[in-house]
């Protein structure tokens, strides 16, 4: 009887897990489609609005080095990518993580308040590491150079005949490498902060 009851219980639980897997499968598909489509539409709308605004500026505005063709196209692409990362699938993943976190804390408090309080005590550490990571990721590298890498590329390709005629390829390559150096140093610091934040979150997870 015990073996039959155990088999029946395992069969019933297996069906529940199968149903949960199916719901999770459909839910993730809907989440991916919903946030992906909304993010792409928002990014497209923002790019169109920014482009429509830029083309209405006077000619003098485009004469500034910070408003060159290469600089504007690079900024438009980078800003659009940032908006897409914030509002697209990344936003859906954040919603999923916080939902699972809230559901997990509720379940642990119902069945074992000791474990639930321990998990709640670790939540600030996890959230703090995420805030540090997102706050540093939103910063932009400071570029003290008069010409940005995008502007330098644009001018180099536009004057490629003169560069080859006077043999200035090496000088332009050196200038381009110098212009990229602030971004490289910024990426190194960003990687360090990202690793620190991820390490803190993993410490909180495995430490409990």
Image (cartoon, rainbow, N blue to C red):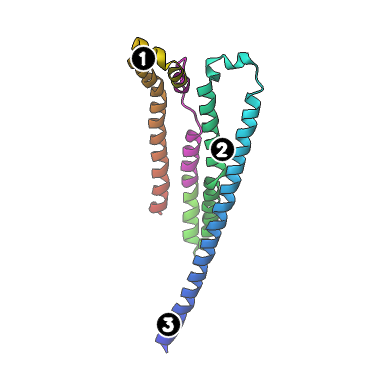
Residue numbers of the magenta segment: 126-152
Residue carrying label 3: 7
Measured from the top left, where is residue 145 in percent x and y?
45, 16
Extreme residue in the top direction: 166
Q: Residues within 10 Å of mark 2 (few under 14, many from 20)?
A: some
Q: Which mark is residue 164?
A: 1
Say which of marks 3 and 2 sits in front.
Answer: 2
Q: Which mark is residue 37?
A: none
Q: Residues within 10 Å of mark 1 (few under 14, many from 20)?
A: few
Q: Which quarter of the picture shows residue 53? A: top right
Question: Is residue 106 something that shows in the picture?
Answer: no
Question: Measuring 41% from the left and 36% from the top, which residue is drawn there?
Answer: 193
Question: Measuring 40% from the left and 12% from the top, which residue is drawn there?
Answer: 162
Q: Quick one: label 1 or label 2, which is nearer the N terminus?
A: 2
Question: Is residue 173 something that shows in the picture?
Answer: yes
Secondary element type, mark 1: helix
State how far apart marks 1 and 2 are (Cα).
39 Å
The one nearer the camera, 107 or 10, is: 10
Vertical order, 21 against 95 (above or below): below
Say which of marks 1 and 2 sits in front.
Answer: 1
Residue carrying label 2: 83
CB contact under 8 Å: marks 1 and 2: no
**In the image, is 39 to the left or to the right of 121?**
right
Vertical order, 20 against 133 (above or below): below
The one nearer the camera, 159 or 124, is: 159
State how far apart marks 3 and 1 are (Cα).
80 Å
CB contact under 8 Å: marks 3 and 1: no
């Amino acid at each position: 009887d015990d073996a039959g009851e155990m088999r029946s219980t395992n069969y019933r639980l297996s069906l529940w897990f199968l149903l949960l897997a199916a719901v999770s499968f459909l839910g993730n598909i809907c989440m991916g489609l919903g946030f992906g489509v909304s993010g792409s539409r928002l990014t497209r709308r923002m790019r169109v609005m920014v482009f429509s605004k830029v083309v209405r500026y006077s000619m003098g505005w485009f004469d500034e080095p910070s408003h060159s063709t290469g600089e504007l196209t690079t900024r438009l692409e980078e800003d659009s990518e940032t908006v897409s990362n914030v509002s697209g699938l990344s936003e859906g993943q954040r919603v999923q993580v916080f939902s699972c976190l809230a559901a997990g804390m509720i379940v642990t408090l119902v069945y074992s308040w000791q474990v639930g309080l321990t998990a709640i005590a670790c939540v600030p550490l996890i959230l703090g590491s995420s805030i540090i990571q997102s706050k540093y990721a939103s910063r932009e590298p400071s570029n003290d150079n008069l010409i940005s890498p995008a502007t330098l590329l644009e001018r180099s390709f536009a004057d490629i005949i003169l560069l080859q005629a006077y043999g200035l390829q090496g000088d332009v390559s050196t200038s381009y490498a110098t212009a990229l150096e602030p971004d490289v140093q910024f990426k190194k610091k960003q990687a360090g902060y990202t690793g620190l934040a991820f390490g803190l979150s993993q410490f909180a997870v495995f430490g409990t």
